Image (spheres, rainbow, N blue to C red):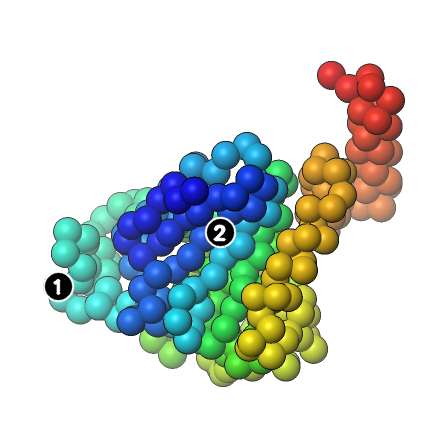
Amino acid sequence: MTLLDKDGVRLTVDDALATVTLTNAAKRNAQSPAMWRALAEVGTLLPGSVRVVVLRGEGASFSAGLDRQAFTPEGFDGEPSFLDMARGPEHEMDALIASYQEAFTWWRRNDLVSIAAVQGHAIGAGFQLALACDLRVCAEDAQFAMRETSLGLVPDLTGTHPLVHLVGYARALEICATGRFVHGDEAGRIGLANLVVPGDELDAAVADLITALLAPPRDAVIETKALLAGAVGRGLEEQRAAERAAQGRRLRDLAGLGE
């Protein structure tokens, strides 16, 4: 069932699985504010039955990043150009960037597990969109790069936080400050990718992962994801308490005593 198909984004749902596809292959799925609004809308349209969300890009590339048209004086039709945005009041610029970030923030909800299936280029905003997901399955030809610094900018679409947690501060700094490419094999070695496979095996690898993620009871996965997501910000005693509370909820539920 197709729930959305506009502005380079298509959402289809099949019971517990939702697939979000970037459909602007002619532009290597370059991103625009309209695409970001559509991606943010996807997060509001998911039925309660959905447990796993797969994000993929049509064509040879996952996403080549921000469409450079954003930096022209004309910008996109009906959109403020980035140059005009910079000239406006600071609070308006802050609010506009915050609205763009909404496309990148819902993928880590505790009730979902999101998977980015990455082939070819994942550059800038494309890299950050892959980082927005919980898991990344990559083809061997995947090429990640954070090119913002080469444009005199910073990564501002929520990618810095997961990148540091995945690869560590020093490596994240080196990747972002140099703008170099991280290829598929390195992405696997440094923990950026959960799995790296030949390009013709990408769909099968994602399908196998989906099957494995859907096998356990949903509430057990939700509780476990919440525990892991909060672990970094908690001390050991706090984490022990969180584990006890979560396990208590699971045991009561299994005993038929849940609320």
Q: Is residue 122 above or below residue 178?
A: above
Residue 93, horizontal then vertical, whole percent: 29, 50
In-image side of 178 versus 211 (left or right): left
Asked whether residue 87 appears in the rendered view, the answer is no
Query: Residue visible at 87% across and 22% down?
Result: 255
In space, the residues marked 2 and 1 are separated at their CA atoms by: 33 Å
Q: Is residue 181 left or right of residue 184?
A: left
Q: Is residue 245 above or below residue 232?
A: above
Amino acid type, callout 2: Thr
Residue of label 2: 19
Q: Secondary structure at mark 2?
A: strand
Q: Is residue 81 above or below residue 109?
A: below
The location of residue 103, given as percent across then percent down, is 41, 49
Q: Which residue lies at the image location 15% right of the left edge and 51% below the top edge?
A: 78
Locate the N terminus by quadrant: top left
Name the residue nearer the viewer: 210 or 163: 210
Residue 128 position in % (x across, y down): 48, 62
Considering only order in the chain, which callout, 1 or 2, is on the residue closer to the N terminus?
A: 2
The residue positioned 43% from the left and 37% from the top of the image is 45
Q: Secondary structure at mark 1?
A: loop
Front label number (2 vs 1): 2
Residues at circles 2 and 1 in contact by the CB criterion of under 8 Å? no
- Give 189 or 83, whichever is nearer the viewer: 189
Q: Which residue is mark 1?
A: 74
Mark 1: few, some, or many residues within 10 Å (few <14, many ≥20)?
some
